[in-house]
Each structure stands twice: as C-alpha cells, then as structure tokens.
Image: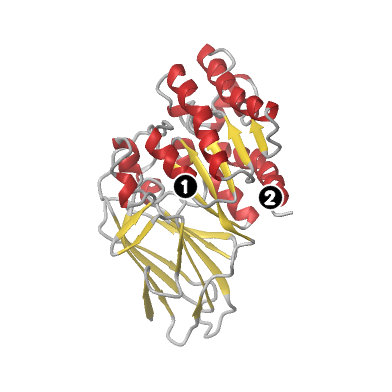
Amino acid sequence: MQKYNIDREPLSVHGLAVKENGTYWRLPSGVIDTVNDGVSNHARETAGARVRFRTDSANLRITYRPLSTEYEGYIMSRAAKSMIGVYIDGRYAGATARSNSAHSTFTYSPLPGAKNARMESVDIYLPIENGIETLDIEIDDGAQILPPLPYKYPEQVVFYGSSITQGLAASHAGRTYVDQVCRALDTEYLNLGFSGSARGEDSIREYIASLPMSAFVLDYDHNAPSLDHLRATHEPLYRAVRKTHPDIPVLIMNRPDFYDWLEDDHERRAIVRATYEKALAEGDERVWFIDGESFFGEGIARFDYTVDGCHPNDAGFDRMAAVVLPVLREMLEKAHG
C-alpha cells in the first residue's frame, strides 16, 4: 500500500493553528503560553480538527499515535476520549480508539476486492480530548489520492466555548454539534472549546479578534467562574471581535443545560442576552441569539439529553445541531449575499 503522513500533500489539515513537526495544536505557540493553564492543556487536544482528501482506493488504512495513552475522565468513555471519526462522502464510516495503546488502526474496505473504486471524499476527525503525535494514511498501490474538494464556505467559522463546545461526551470525533452543523453547511471552521477553562480573558480575546473568520459563535458562559467575571468579560469579547470584523455575523448563545429552577442560570442568561440586546440597540444588524433553554425541552426531561445533567450525549448534540443549523445557515447566506 502507498503511505502518506499527515503533513504530506495532497492531505489537507484543518482546524489547527500549528500542524507540523509533530505539533498539532489549536493555538499557536505565541498564544498557548499566555492563556490559563486549562486552555493551554486543552489547546493541545485536537477537537474539531480534520484531515481531508479524496481517493479511489478500495481499501483505506489509518494509523495514528495518540499524544497521551493515559485515561482520566468521568464523562467520556475510554474509547471516546481518543477516538478518531472517519466520514466517507459525508457518511459515518467508523472509528478507532484505544487510548491505552501506542497505536490505533482503522481499516475501511468500501468495495472489497475491487481494483478501482469510485473517487470518494474522506474526512478524518481527530480526537476530541486527546492529541496526536503521528497519523499515516495508506491506500492501495495504483490508487489515486487527490486534494479535497473546497468547502462551500472556505473562510472559517470560529466557535469559542466550554467543554460542550469542545464536544466532551460525544461518542466519537465528528459527532459534536459543531462538527454536525459545519459538515451540513460545508464550511471551514475552528473549534476553540476548552473544557472548564474558557473565561474570555484578555489574551484569548485578543487572539480570537485577530483571526480571519466568516462568522463567530460566542458560547462560553458555562466557564465564567462568577457572575461578575461573566459580566466583565462577555460584552468586551463581542466588541473586540466586532471591532476587527465589523461585517461578520455573530451568534451569541447561553448554556444548553439551562434549568428553570436555578437562579444562577437565569442570571447568566440575562448577562449573555444583555450583550445581544445592547448590540441590537446600537444598530448591529448582524447579531443573533439562541437561548440555551430551547435545546433540550422542558423540565426534568432535559436530563435525558445529557450524561450528567450538564454535558450533552449524542442525542443532546443532535438537538443542539438541529437548533443551531438553520440559524448559522441564515447567517452565512446573509454574509455571502
């Protein structure tokens, strides 16, 4: 079989700030040392990152070495922590993960025994809560491997948020609400979800505002350590992005695990919504708001869409994607005329 390393053309790597010489991070080296320790650690995880290409190989083998072979976690299974997700022509084809193993291998044979399969698009979603050291693609001798088709929306949508944005508790990479929505829209994107650590402080605010983007999704209130902190950082983050990107659409959301009987949830939502309403009052016509209470239904049934009352399970991510998709589609269509 022919072998291609992750850094070898025509493989195309997406959703990472650094992607060479064995370093695959979601933040660049100049930023990763200025943020809080939680963000610095989670930025070395590859949530939302993808390796893309096309091939007519009848067989596909993917071998990768995870950054960590240890398992610590209470909401993610050992398998899901380090699992890659493989999609062929937009359909889930399978995954592999053994986070306690030095190597994990995925083998796919769409047309067993065939010498010439049709050209298919392959998207490999990298681990949600782990990183990688190496990744190799093997295809049949004589098969072609080509660059991926361009995204319909080639400029990235940037998502900033908590462990829910990062995708913890999804069954495999590619299954988060961010992945689902962006796959449906055929758009480039960057997942800046940092479990327990997204606090909207100065360094991350400046970095996000500097990024090229076609749209911005602001969804970090879960990780603000207090109401005062959220109040002090939320609107400034929106304004920093709006200052450098005066015309892009911005989607503001509050936490999906909203419980009507918790006063703190109401107060956090009010702070988040105040940013949105102030933007509207000042004439911003490219700002949207989604109330987190709309994601999981009503009452105690909301727990059914989480693994622990907080983090969405696959059904919860499906519900989030169903709500976010039409809104983000409207945003991108408006942005692109």
- The type of colouring in the image is secondary structure
Query: Which residue position is annotated with label 2?
Result: 335
Instruction: Spot the residue most to the bottom.
Output: 142
Proximity of marks 1 and 2: CB atoms separated by less than 8 Å? no
Q: Decide which of tag 1 and tag 2 comes sooner along the chain.
A: 1
Q: Is residue 82 left or right of residue 318?
A: left
Type of residue at label 1?
Ser
**Residue closest to the eye, 214 or 184:** 214
Question: How many residues crowd around disc 2 within 10 Å: few (fewer than 14), some, or many (20 or more)?
Answer: some
Q: Residue at image x 36%, y 46%? A: 43
Q: Position of residue 61 (x, y in %)?
A: 41, 70
Q: Is residue 206 left or right of residue 102?
A: right
Q: Is residue 110 left or right of residue 197?
A: right
Q: Residue at image x 58%, y 49%? A: 180
For the question of whether residue 147 can be seen, the reply is yes
Question: How many residues crowd around disc 1 within 10 Å: few (fewer than 14), some, or many (20 or more)?
Answer: some
Q: Residue at image x 54%, y 79%? A: 56
**Residue closest to the eye, 277 or 141:** 277
SS for tag 1?
A: helix
SS for tag 2?
A: helix
**Residue closest to the eye, 187 or 284:** 284
Type of residue at label 2?
Ala
- Mark-to-mark CA distance, 1 and 2: 19 Å
Q: Is residue 318 above or below residue 268?
A: below
Q: Quadrant of the N terminus?
A: bottom left
Query: Which residue position is annotated with label 1?
Result: 210
Q: Position of residue 85 (x, y in %)?
A: 47, 56
Q: Is residue 189 above or below residue 295?
A: below
Q: Position of residue 12 (x, y in %)?
A: 46, 67
Q: Between label 1 and label 2, give the one nearer the viewer.
A: 1
